[in-house]
Amino acid sequence: MNRQYPDPAKEVERLSAHHGGSDRMATLFLTSACNLKCPYCYATENTFSADEQWTMPRIERVLDLLKTKGFRLALGGGEPLTDIPLVLETGRQATIRNIPISLLTNGYMLTPALLRDLRHAGFNWIQVSADSQKEVAHFEPLFLEGSRIGLRMAVGTVLLPQRMKDIRGMLEIMARANITGWRILRYTPLDHNSRIQQAPSNEEWINMLLTVEAIVRSSGYCPVQIRYEPSVAPLSWLEGLSQAEKLDVCGGRRARRVFLYPDGGTYACGLPRRKGISLASFESDLEEWLQHIDHVPPDRCLFPEPDAQMQSYCRDVCRGGCVQMRGDSPCDPRCALDHGLVPVCCFEKLLIATGISGEGRLFYPSEVFESWRSNYGG
């Protein structure tokens, strides 16, 4: 697919995308309603008021704008399938405009009949949240049915330390069920959530990723494309990347992935409104929106230089914003600059296995964190 960038000359070095699935992707948060209550879900921070609801005229306006910019669309929430008619009509309208459309769902409202309806409406990719071997096994019949009718089925897993024993079994089921992609995310409870103690520390998360890598490598042939959320990255590793690669890791820098809300708000960097990088409103600030949708203003997404010292960086550069956290939180708790680690955008995932038809450079956790382990004994 040919894509247009603000400054093509600066894109010459850019790799073909170790996380290309996120390139020029807009996620429309269709609803804040959900049939589940997951403690780590960022959607819990978003409640839409009565006058902040998506309507088809508003959605069609957004689709027309996204089409001019070459974006693809994903529907998220809450749980989008709490409003199935709106999901299906959005799919149909996106398809009319030749906009590829995908669905992010917890899966518990899916049925074989609904999968067929989604396919007929134009959806081509369905990602189901499944955090354990038991859940993946539960959804296996739906994965197989989706694959049979031509949907690309994917899994998103928020990984807890106690689920590490499930990794091998989950991978085996996914391979058997024709899963296209597996996205592995860090468990990060929000704010003062009572389950914050369950979240892995930086060191624990790095060791978990290294274990996943060892399991994937030992499995031999892997038909599933596997991407992982680095969550944090060593400054020494970032220093070794080209500028294009740095922009690939921090996706908010070029608004490659944006998030839309029914009040008109548009944000980069993959976090809820309270913490994301605000771009503009497609309803009230259209000219600014059209400009920023192409390129996030540099002063809105600052990136640490490898030689920055923690105190001066926090005082002069971060100012409570870190790389991605904005709003009420004074600092991203993952930041450990004094130990060589800095947060990177959680929606730009690095590649462990390319799968059957995947492309891109493999960024194994051992490669990313090798220098950090050498320096800090992690």
Image: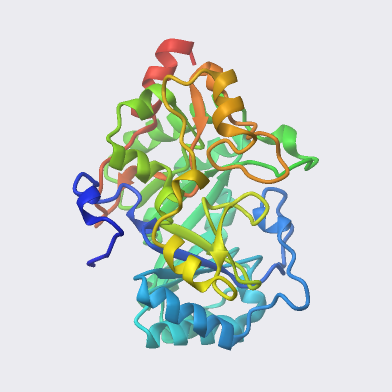
| Residue 145 picture location, percent across and down | 44, 73
Q: Residue at x 63, y 68 (%)?
A: 108
Vertical position of residue 225 compared to residue 30: above or below = above
Question: Which residue is located at x 45 percent, y 53 percent?
Answer: 296
Q: Residue 29 at what x, y percent from top left?
A: 60, 68
Q: In the rendered view, would you say 121 is above or below 374?
A: below
**Front-most of 200 and 160?**
200
Please, is residue 112 above or below residue 74 in the view?
below
Q: Position of residue 334 (x, y in %)?
A: 60, 31
Q: Which residue appears at 45% of the width and 87% of the height?
A: 92
- Of the 4 image quadrants, the one containing the N terminus is bottom left
Q: Is residue 116 visible?
A: no
Residue at position x 66%, y 53% in the image: 41
In the rendered view, would you say 325 is above or below 145? Answer: above
Q: In this view of the protein, which residue sits in the foreground, 276 or 369?
A: 276
Q: Quadrant of residue 358?
A: bottom left
In the image, 120 versus 276, the foreground residue is 276
Q: Is residue 335 left or right of residue 252?
A: right
How is the model colour-coded? rainbow
Number of callouts in the render?
0
The reply to whether residue 306 is in sight is: yes
Q: Nearer the viewer, residue 183 or 141?
A: 183
- The location of residue 228, given as percent across then percent down, is 44, 43
